[in-house]
Amino acid sequence: MPHVDTPAVRTPREVLNRYYQAMLDKSPDDLADLYAVDAVHEFPFTSPGFPPRYEGREAVRAGYRAAWGASPVQVQEVRKIAAYETVDPEVIIAEHVVAGTLPTGRTDFTVPGLLILHIRSGLITRARDYMDNSAVANARG
């Protein structure tokens, strides 16, 4: 089982930064280790080929391992547009654009997104991941 360091000292902004780093590294373990055991990760704008949600840390781990493992996409950059702290200290909202390439033809792409993270005791308890699925599908070909 992957090591989870003491999350209680992580602020929502620190969790968000680690989330982005896990995306850059394509590390399902680093990403999943940011989640509470019973967390829920939702994709409200899902489309065919995309799951509507992952329930639990291990579902996040398995889902991202399968998705990232099967994808030739290489994330080059996460352009952080803005991060908004809310009146609820356990919620952070982030706007970003993921820029990447596909090895075949070195096709560049961008995927805009909005992420709402609920974080308690340094772990994500709920994530709502609003990404442009059509941009993802186009990037996949």
Image: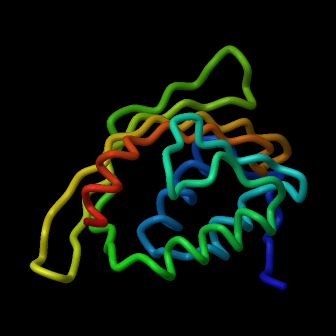
Residue placed furthest toward the left: 105
Quarter occupied by residue 44: top right
Q: Residue furthest right?
A: 38
Residue drawn at the location 40% of the way across and 39% of the way down: 113
Q: Is residue 82 left or right of residue 90?
A: left
Horizontally, residue 79 falls left or right of residue 109, namely: right
Q: Residue at the location (66% across, 42% down)? A: 42
Display colour scheme: rainbow
Q: Is residue 74 above or below residue 131?
A: below
Q: Is residue 5 above or below residue 120?
A: below
Whole-percent x, y for residue 90 in the image: 75, 31
Residue 20 at x, y = what percent?
A: 48, 57
Q: How far across and down, in percent of the image, does residue 109 sit?
A: 20, 57
Q: Out of 51 and 62, give the one closest to the viewer.
A: 51
Q: Residue furthest front?
A: 48
Q: Nearer the viewer, residue 36 or 86?
A: 36
* Vertical order, 12 against 21 (above or below): above
**In which quadrant is the C terminus drawn?**
bottom left
Residue 59 picture location, percent across and down: 77, 65
Tally of numbered discs = 0
Vertical comparison of 136 with 32: above or below: above
Residue at 60 percent across and 32 percent down: it is: 92
Figure quadrant of residue 104? bottom left
Q: Looking at the figure, which quarter contains the N terminus?
A: bottom right
- Name the residue: 21% across, 70% down: 101
Q: Is residue 22 left or right of residue 110?
A: right
